[in-house]
Image: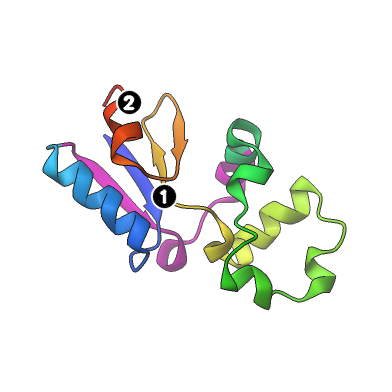
Amino acid sequence: MYTLYGISNCDTVRKARKWLEEHGIKYCFHDFRKEGTELELLKSWVEELGLEQLLNTRGTTWRKIPESKKKHLSPEKAVQLMQEFPSVIKRPVLDTGQKRHLGFSGKAYENLDL
């Protein structure tokens, strides 16, 4: 079974969930905000997807984080920041078991081997 990671009130996550349901694809939803994220999981995502891709620096949550926490951001510090402020993780993250896919577009999901 696939796992879709995100935040339940995110419009993009809602679109991804709707698309998966309309296409009869079974998945488990993991809400970052309610359930948190494991440190090792985030580290593996950074390695696979890249920090620049995974970290949402354009959102309101990012702007609210104190500059002192964003200064000299190493991958390790970024992972800790993502744990503390899960809304800075770009979403959704679809885990197929073989690979992780970041973001949502119906066209991109159609091209996945789901």
Inspect the image, locate mark 2, and give the three-letter code of the amino acid beneath it.
Leu
Q: How many marks?
A: 2
Residue 79 position in % (x across, y down):
67, 52
User: Circle 1: is it few (<14), some (14-19), or many (20+) Cα within 10 Å?
Assistant: many
Residue occupying the point 18% across, 36% down: 25
Find the magenta span and give its range. 25-43
**Would residue 113 be found to the left or right of residue 31 on screen?**
left
The verdict on residue 42 being magenta is yes
**Would residue 108 be found to the left or right of residue 22 on screen?**
right
Out of 85 and 22, give the one closest to the viewer. 22
Out of 51 and 42, give the one closest to the viewer. 51
Inspect the image, locate mark 1, and give the three-letter code of the amino acid beneath it.
Pro
Residue 36 position in % (x across, y down):
49, 61
**Would residue 60 be found to the left or right of residue 72 on screen?**
left
Out of 81 and 19, give the one closest to the viewer. 19
Looking at the rendered structure, the secondary structure element under dot 1 is: loop
> Can you identify the residue that label 1 sits on?
92
Question: How did the renderer colour the structure?
Answer: rainbow
> Up-down: is 83 above or below 53?
below
Residue occupying the point 36% across, 56% down: 12
